Amino acid sequence: MADAHAKPNHDYHIIAPSPWPFLGSLGALIMAIGGVAWMQYLKQGNFPFFGFNLASSHWYLFAIGLAIVLYTMYGWWGDTIKEAHEGHHTRVVSLHLRYGMIMFIASEVMFFVAWFWAFFDASLFPNEVHQVARAEFTGGVWPPKGIEVLDPFHLPLYNTIILLLSGTTVTWAHHALIHGDRKGLINGLALTVGLGVLFSFVQAYEYIHAPFTFHDSIYGATFFMATGFHGFHVIIGTIFLLVCLIRAMKGDFTPKQHFGFEAAAWYWHFVDVVWLFLFASIYVWASVGATIAHGH
């Protein structure tokens, strides 16, 4: 009986009791409360919560929650890697992992649809009669009056080339893995991580020297929300690929079993595609007829 339980006659994996869902939820709750307290602190310096003013400890709460979430990610995904090494990722389990990643990316697509919707709603209808406040805020034109936009064929084009190159290097790494070329896998991943870091530095430089701010108008708000969240996803994807690089250097992944790397590659290609839409709409299309900021 014990042997039958240890080696069940099915392709499904019954997961052992795990602390990670509860711990991750607790960390997310603390981080959310800390984040709200932080924003209230910046706004008015007061955040009453069950008789306590959490505004004074906003930073500590946020940091504690973030630390718990990061520890949960490390432990939970570490357990998943261990399960794979122990042979629990059967054909059925691997298929379900793929379904899970596909649904996650689909949810991310809808997340960015919201920001594109906000951008196009404001840009295509800047002078709607029933939106008088918006018309006054934009001057009835897009980009709003007084706003100088970034030159799309300067740093944005440079970052587009960087991301397109990173898409080719991660594909090179994938093909190298499939053909058992460990050196090609490591080199391709290393180049992809380097290009991801370079993209983030270029975007940070662009933000610092942008001729408009988040508070200037709805143009600045939609621009920084859409491109900023994309930049956050680039950072997440870079870390994802960095973990895959470390695992590859340790000898993980085989031509037949490498979903951890495959998921990272899917995520990275998703980030690439979103950027192409951002570049085409928010940078190029929105700059037509607009005043280009000199030197940007």
Image (cartoon, rainbow, N blue to C red):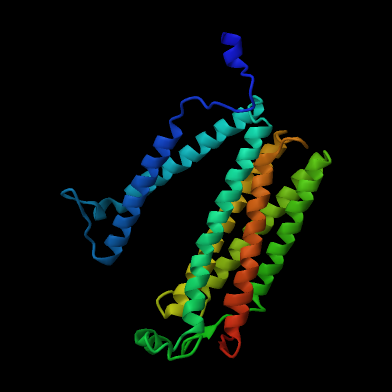
Q: Which residue sits furthest left? A: 51
* Left or right: 61 in relation to 280: left
* Looking at the image, residue 113 lies above or below residue 172: below
Image spot of residue 218 (x, y percent): 43, 78
Point out the image quarter for the N terminus: top right
Question: Residue sitting at 48 percent across and 78 percent down?
Answer: 121
In this rendered view, identify the residue nearer to me: 262 or 103: 103
Question: Residue sitting at 59 percent across and 63 percent down?
Answer: 201
* Left or right: 109 in relation to 131: right
In this rendered view, identify the residue nearer to me: 188 or 290: 290
* Left or right: 23 in relation to 38: right
In this rendered view, identify the residue nearer to me: 255 or 49: 255
Point out the image quarter for the C terminus: bottom right
Question: Residue sitting at 62 percent across and 70 percent down?
Answer: 277
Residue 213 appears in view: no
Question: Residue sitting at 58 percent across and 44 percent down?
Answer: 100
